[in-house]
Image (spheres, coloured by chain):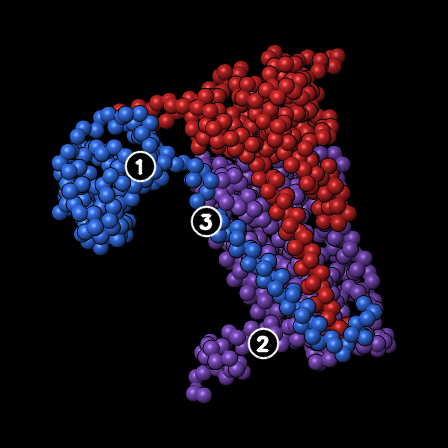
Chain colours: A red, B blue, C purple
Amino acid sequence: MLRMSFKALALTLGIFAAAPAHAAGEAIPIPDRKFSFDGIFGTYDRASAQRGFQVYKEVCAACHGLRLLSYRNLRDLGLTEAQVAAIASQFEIKDGPNDEGQMFERPGRPADRFRSPFPNDAAARAANNGALPPDLSVMTKARAGGADYLFALLTGYVDPPPGVTVMDGMHYNKYFPGNQIAMGPVLNPDQVEYADGTKATVEQMAHDVSTFLQWAAEPELEQRRALGVKIIIFLTILAGLTYAVKRKIWADVEH
Amino acid sequence: MADTAHAAPDGAPRRDFLKLVTGAFAAVGVGAIAWPFIASLQPAKDTLALASTDVDLAPITEGQAVTVMWRGKPVFVRSRTPKEIEEARAVAVNSLPDPATDQSRVQREQWLVLIGICTHLGCVPTGQRPTDTRGDYGGWFCPCHGSHYDTSGRIRKGPAPRNLDVPQYAFTSDTKIRIG
Amino acid sequence: MSIGLHKSEFSNPVVRWIDQRLPVFTMMQKEYGTFPTPRNFNYFWNFGALAMVTLMIMIATGIFLSMHYAAHTSLAFDSVERIMRDVNAGWLIRYVHMNGASMFFIVVYIHIFRGMYYGSYKAPRELLWMLGVVIFLLMMATAFMGYVLPWGQMSFWGATVITNLFSAFPVVGNYIVELLWGGFSVDNPTLNRFFSLHYLLPFVILGVVFLHVAALHITGSNNPLGIEPKGPQDTLPFHPYYTAKDSVGLVVYFIVFAVLVFFAPNYLGHPDNYIPANPLVTPPHIVPEWYFLPYYAILRAVPDKLGGVLLMFGSILIWFVLPWLDRSPVRSMRFRPLARLFFLLWTVNFLVLLWVGAKPAEGTYVLIAQIATAYYFAYFLVILPLLAKFERPLPLPESISRPVLGGGPLPMGAAAKPMEKA
């Protein structure tokens, strides 16, 4: 994985010998999952991300918000303007005040932010036994391991090892730091019906929603990498030229 | 490089060419740096997306006007009286500073929708409230530098160069419009 | 030419007209054109120029970021994400700024260690060195306050921990902390003043950099041999020789910078800073940005609160008196076999502190941190003063050009001769 190769590079340079310790808790190492966006030239698998959006919308969105995204952002996933408008209009968005000074609800528009499932954190806690379902907008950037971690978490529900008592209302997950997580195993086989006929296994849904959330957190990723390749090629040529000029200039000096 | 010593006699032109190419490359690089900075000053994607406002026309009685906010600017919506419409259509189009027919400026003749920004230097003309001065032509009057607009929002007198702009809008029902 | 006008050498009439009245062109020509520079610089001498360029990049990107940033606890996090998502090229500007901080510290650390290795702090360059330490302290303050601005969990708790350091001081401690906070905890007033100072301090840095460069151009640069140039045969005009050499380093530097920005923009950051600040929950494992880790390790190596804080501040303040701790007449450690060994060990020790600073403060890590802290200070306070007395330096070359042009070093007698001015 890219991150690992950079770590190796950094270590050899000896500059970042102590590069940031990613808080891992005591959870076991997160397995590397193969995603379309891995590596330097990776891009988002649009079909997978669209399916992931469906999983988010039909499963995750009951508790988790995506407040930094707008419906219009879905255009990036390959949806048409009409599809985005249709999706947005399924949600009732709070607006106002109107001429009578009252807040009112109206169908969503593409420019609206994703509607959060709860009006505020207190309401979210009240509805979830005191646990706060975190907003997922930048989730892959906010967890060590990123999308790998999300996938591992969503597929990491197992029976607790002998001797471990799981607290009331909690669930055992081998990848969650501390292992006891308030979120239950929400993905079940065929929980959603994919329009493209893909079989909705737990693994498939977890993979798709991880791809979707990676895109949600880093929508600029493809553009960033494409630009980066161009700039580095440019700089490499410029470095060669500059070095040649430097050698020419210094050619008549003994040093 | 081993051949640098041999290249000495014609070394000078080659060096100049090399410097020229390197300089050109570097100049392109420095120029490109300006791009992200200038781009960041342009309206952001969310600003561009926030482009529509709904206006309910039902409560606006004949002769009345309301001002709504659209893209941070006032939009004038006026329910014109038949007399005002008639005045707007009676004038000879060619005699106007910025010739335009009234028909070209409205979708339904009763409803005049305008961006309420004087085309001179950006003040908001008066004329929305019944007590406001409406200028010599019964439309709007800009108090900043004395521009007079008629009942079609066209400039008739004063320093403003253009008629009041008509925003993009559409009737979503008989009593509702969406601006933008 | 009338009295009162500068005597300009330029032939271009416009340039000449300006130069006669405000001799900026003459000054540039003198300081960056014909400026006599030792001919034997290695690539470590690039890093001053790299630091200067990085400062410019940080100021430029910072100004444009501030046009979109909202310094309010309820808006800061979202405004940064808006820059990433909606502002045109906003992600690029922000990632350059964010990683630019790390690049700045890498460059400046190399610049500082180069100065330590080649004895650039020694007479007559003591003030030049001290101004450099001032720049470094200002950089640390600026970087710390900048890290607070995105208002993530690490921002908030980093700010809380660092400002609480001042509570260690007896009597006035708590007063100072409330003064920093503008309240009873890190909150909106804190964020606002940090933003204000984060915008201001880089320009203060720019001012001190100007003094740093001005001082440099009085004494002239040190060089890898640590001996002063004896005449024109030892120097080259800055342009085109070092402008060309600096350009090579600069482009290579940009490649490294670009790899970080475009392919691993969050590698040096901490994931917790993408969680909005929450004053009710401390992250399980809080660490400062990597460039502060050595000092963080020193802080935690001491079991006493005030002691740890004093030692931490002392670890940088001690650099101010380095010119007087190291009294050896030989500058470059090329000619100081023992000092070289101890310095390289000190550098490794610094990296050990950096590494251990990221580890939890428990068990063996504390012991490692304590040993490394002891060596950090022993190097300055014990080893360098003793070496100045007892070390036998290698013979110094007669001049910069002599070994370069094939002459051998002088016989042993000249070795301990104190350095003389050219």
Q: Distance between the residues labelled 1 and 3?
A: 23 Å
The mark nearer the N terminus, 1 or 3, is 3
Residue at image position (45%, 30%) is A110
Residue at image position (43%, 84%) is C4
Closest to the observer, C124 or A209? A209
Is A29 left, or right, of C69 in this rendering?
Answer: right
Q: How crowded is mark 2: few (under 14 residues within 10 Å), some or many (20 or more)?
A: some
Is A140 left, or right, of C151 in this rendering?
Answer: right
Q: What element carries label 2?
A: helix
Q: How crowded is mark 3: few (under 14 residues within 10 Å), some or many (20 or more)?
A: some
Mark 3 sits on what residue? Answer: B41
Q: Which amino acid does label 3 sit on?
A: Leu
Q: Is mark 1 on a helix, strand or loop?
A: strand
Q: Are marks 2 and 1 on the same chain?
A: no
Residue C239, by quadrant, is bottom right
Q: What residue type is labelled 1?
A: Met
Q: How far apart are marks 3 and 2 (CA)?
A: 38 Å
Mark 1 sits on what residue? Answer: B69
Q: Answer above or below: position of B18 versus C319.
A: below
The subunit carrying tag 3 is B
Report x, y in % for residue C301: 69, 41
Is A24 left, or right, of C67 in this rendering?
Answer: right
Marker disc for residue C30: 2
Residue at image position (58%, 27%) is A50
Quadrant for the C terminus of chain C in the image? bottom right
Q: What residue type is labelled 2?
A: Lys
Report x, y in % for residue A234: 65, 55
Report x, y in % for residue A5: 74, 41
Would residue B154 be seen by someone viewing this image from the given angle? yes
The subunit carrying tag 2 is C
Which of label 3 and label 2 is nearer to you?
3
